[in-house]
């Protein structure tokens, strides 16, 4: 998947307009500044995944839609394919590539995985 910052920027702009929301209002809701939102809209800055998730949550849309991966705004059932610890572990590995992260020890990586698995239900409900 190639992230297209222009598509993200366009969709964010449309969402703001459709919801009669200002950049400042969105910034307050997601805990950032209106300057940061402005930079997202002008393609000067690429948002972190956690910020994308917060924006999607504010507008009650899917992250895939916001990123331009899907044309559907509908949020998919987050428990659909993530019911097993194995699938959650694979997701973590794909998203964060912890094994290739040189500043974390194997013990730290295992601890992170255990914490994620122990809190799976909470994570998936967020």
Image: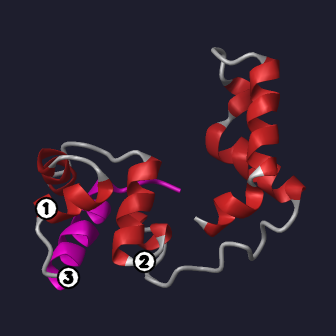
Q: CA distance from mark 1 to mark 3?
A: 11 Å
Q: Residues within 10 Å of mark 1 (few under 14, many from 20)?
A: some
What crowding class fits label 2: few (fewer than 14 Cα within 10 Å), some (14-19), or many (20 or more)?
A: some
- In the rendered image, residue 18, in percent from the top left (x then y), is placed at 19, 84
Q: Which mark is residue 61?
A: 2
- Helix, strand or loop under label 3: loop
Quadrant housing the C terminus = bottom right
Would you name the residue on which mark 1 appears? 23
Q: Main secondary structure of the magenta part?
A: helix
Residue 100's x, y, as percent? 70, 25
Figure check: 40 above or below 19: above
- Residue named by callout 3: 19
Say which residue appears at 12% left-offset and 46% top-offset.
35
Instruction: Look at the image and give the residue range highlighted in magenta.
Output: 1-18
Q: Residue 51 colored magenta?
A: no
Residue sitting nearer the eye, 113 or 44: 113
- Residue 14 drawn in magenta: yes
Residue in front for this viewpoint, 1 or 83? 83
Helix, strand or loop at label 1? It is helix
Q: Earlier in the sequence, mark 1 or mark 2?
A: 1
């Amino acid at each position: 998947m190639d992230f297209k910052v222009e598509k993200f920027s366009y969709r964010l702009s449309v969402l703001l307009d459709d919801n009669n929301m200002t950049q400042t209002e969105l910034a307050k809701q997601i805990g950032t500044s209106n300057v940061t939102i402005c930079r997202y809209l002008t393609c000067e800055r690429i948002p972190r995944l956690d910020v994308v998730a917060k924006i999607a949550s504010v507008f009650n849309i899917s992250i895939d839609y916001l990123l331009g991966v899907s044309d559907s705004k509908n949020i998919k059932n987050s428990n659909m394919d993530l019911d097993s610890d194995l699938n959650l572990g694979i997701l973590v590995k794909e998203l964060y590539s912890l094994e290739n992260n040189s500043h974390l020890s194997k013990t730290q990586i295992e601890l992170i995985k255990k914490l994620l698995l122990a809190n799976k239900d909470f994570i998936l409900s967020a």
